[in-house]
Image (cartoon, rainbow, N blue to C red):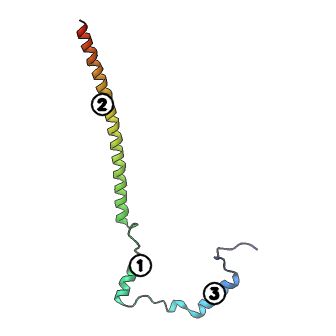
Amino acid sequence: MPKTKNTKGWSERRRKRQACNARRNKPWKSATGPKTAKGKEASRMNALKHGYCAAGYNALRKAFRLNREFIRHILAYDAVARELDTILLTKRTEEKTNKIKGDSER
């Protein structure tokens, strides 16, 4: 028997019986939603889960991420600059030492 679309484990007979029950009971007619102002206010918030996917929050997260990347680049550049300063200082110290040695030998 060829496999059909995903039926969540329901047999063909069970799906037909459930469809017949749904047509007979018409559950969609009794699903009217909130009627009071308080109920409407509460249902208005159903789609809002936590706000972590809101556009403003996503923009803020992106700004923080860019800021972290910028700081990493600055720190990496600073580390290279400090290394170069160390190399130059060492070279200057060696030059001064050699100059002093040369002057004392004369």
Residue 26 vertical position relative to residue 72 in the rendered view, above or below: below
Report how far apart the C-alphas of labels 2 and 1 lie in the structure. Answer: 59 Å
Q: CA distance from mark 3 to mark 1?
A: 28 Å
Of pointers 2 and 1, the one earlier in the residue sequence = 1
Q: Earlier in the sequence, mark 3 or mark 1?
A: 3
Mark identifier at residue 18: 3
- Looking at the rendered structure, the kind of residue marked 2 is Asp
Please tell me which residue lies in front, 95 or 73. Answer: 95
Residue position for label 1: 46
What amino acid type should be assigned to the residue bearing mark 1? Asn
Q: Earlier in the sequence, mark 2 or mark 3?
A: 3
Q: Residue at x 48, y 89 (%)?
A: 31
Disc on res. 85: 2
Q: Is residue 63 left or right of residue 20?
A: left
Choose mark 2 or mark 1, whichever is in front.
2
In percent of width and height, residue 54 lies at: 38, 67
